Amino acid sequence: MFIREKRRTNKDGTVVTYLQLVENRRVEGKTGQRVLCTLGRTDDPTLPRRLSALVETASRYAEVELP
């Protein structure tokens, strides 16, 4: 799994960027990607706080210590 930025251009030319949680998987011998969820827009001021909470929760199950 990984996080990717997905950019979308509006009709007025402005660009909006979203963060997505994506997994690679093999289907019928071909590798494909599946979006598990959209985490939010990068211009959302609450996004860093929500991502920090997600990392903290996930670190309980990982073999990594947070600083």
Image (tube, rainbow, N blue to C red):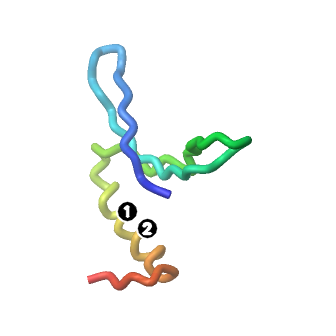
Q: Is residue 26 above or below residue 58?
A: above
Task: Check residue 63 in the rendering and tell me which mark sits there, or answer none.
Answer: none
User: Residue sitting at 31 percent across and 45 percent down?
Assistant: 42
Please name the residue that numbered disc 2 is placed on: 54
Disc 2 element: helix
Residue 1: image x %, image y %? 50, 58
Q: Quadrant of the C terminus?
A: bottom left
User: Residue sitting at 40 percent across and 70 percent down?
Assistant: 55
- Separation of marks 1 and 2 at Cα, in angstroms: 5 Å
Q: Is residue 30 left or right of residue 55?
A: right
Residue 21: image x %, image y %? 48, 52
Most distant residue in the right direction: 28
Asked if the residue at tag 2 contacts the one at tag 1, i.e. Cβ–Cβ closer than 8 Å, the answer is yes
Q: Is residue 33 above or below residue 10?
A: below
Residue 44: image x %, image y %? 31, 47
Between 25 and 3, which is closer to the camera in this rendering? 25
Between 30 and 65, which is closer to the camera in this rendering? 30
Which amino acid type is marked by label 1?
A: Leu
User: Residue sitting at 28 percent across and 43 percent down?
Assistant: 43
Please name the residue that numbered disc 1 is placed on: 51
User: Residue sitting at 34 percent across and 37 percent down?
Assistant: 17
Q: Is residue 22 above or below residue 48?
A: above
Crowding near pointer 2: few (<14 within 10 Å), some, many (20+)? few
Q: Is residue 26 left or right of residue 45?
A: right
Crowding near pointer 1: few (<14 within 10 Å), some, many (20+)? few
Q: Is residue 26 left or right of residue 58?
A: right
Disc 1 element: helix
Q: Is residue 49 left or right of residue 33?
A: left
Residue 3: image x %, image y %? 41, 53
